[in-house]
Image (cartoon, rainbow, N blue to C red):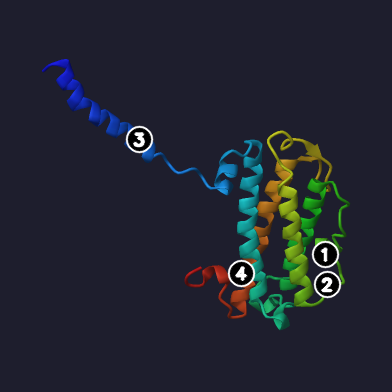
Amino acid sequence: MRFATVRRVVLPFLLTGVCLAVTHRPAPLPAQARATAQAPAANAMAAVLQRNLSIIEQEFVETADAMPADRFSFAPSSSMGEFTGVRTFAQEVTHVAAVNKNIFAALLGEKAPDMGTNENGPASLKTKAEIMQYLRDSFAMGHRAMATINQKNAMEKIDHPFGPRSRLDLAMISLTHPYDHFGQMVEYLRMNHIIPPTSRPGH
């Protein structure tokens, strides 16, 4: 086959391929997705911490809110087993919120709030509404604190009643500690014939 013939046969296909390649380029990412993709690697640590805080926040707040206001003072009696000196349902909630606030204040460089007796938070908290607001405020404070952690400062030691600890260490405590009390609150709900939100169909 002569060169001129080859050119007449092959060239149209090549041009078609180029046109298709140009026409079918991937669409540019939306601005928000593009910003996320280009975010500095240092923010990745904060993003992971924020995501995990949101998980325990949702589960813990839902579980706390599931107990009726008139049962917030519930604590298992000795007839149910060995429960001497255990916290009431309300105290389980305020204890976690108080520890949250204490940890997050340290991460933010703010004054440590009043932990109250036995780390149960301010004695002024009486009603379910007050306690739930105190709890939600503690997690809101947590999101501000998590946003300050990055790869450069994660291992920086800061003073805390738990002892000098790294920022990342304190952040991890705030993610794991609530689950200790979440489990107890689930049992308290079941003792009151309430299915915990996390055990309900479709959750």
Q: Which mark is residue 125?
A: 2
Q: In terms of secondary structure, where does tag 4 sit?
A: helix
Q: Secondary structure at mark 1?
A: loop
Task: Report the Cα–Cα distance between label 4 and label 2.
Answer: 22 Å
Label 3 sits on residue = 21
Estimate the spatial distance between the alpha carbons at disc 2 and disc 3, rounded to whole Å.
Answer: 66 Å
Residue at 51% across, 72% down: 200
Category of crowding for the residue at label 4, using alpha-carbon neighbours closer than 10 angstroms: few (below 14), some (14–19), many (at least 20): many
Q: Which mark is first along the chain, 3 or 1?
A: 3
The residue where tag 4 is placed is: 186
Closest to the camera, between mark 2 and mark 3, is 3
User: Disc 4 or 1, which lies upstream in sequence?
Assistant: 1
Instruction: Please state which amino acid type lies under the numbered disc 3.
Output: Ala
The residue carrying mark 1 is 121
Query: Which element carries disc 2, helix, strand or loop?
Result: loop
| Residue 37 drawn at (x, y percent) | 56, 41
**Is 77 drawn above or below residue 133 in the view shown?**
below
Question: Helix, strand, or loop for circle 3?
Answer: helix
Can you give x and y, in whole percent of width and height, for residue 100 in the image? 75, 56
Q: Please say whether residue 31 is visible from this viewpoint.
A: yes
4 and 2 marks in contact (CB < 8 Å): no
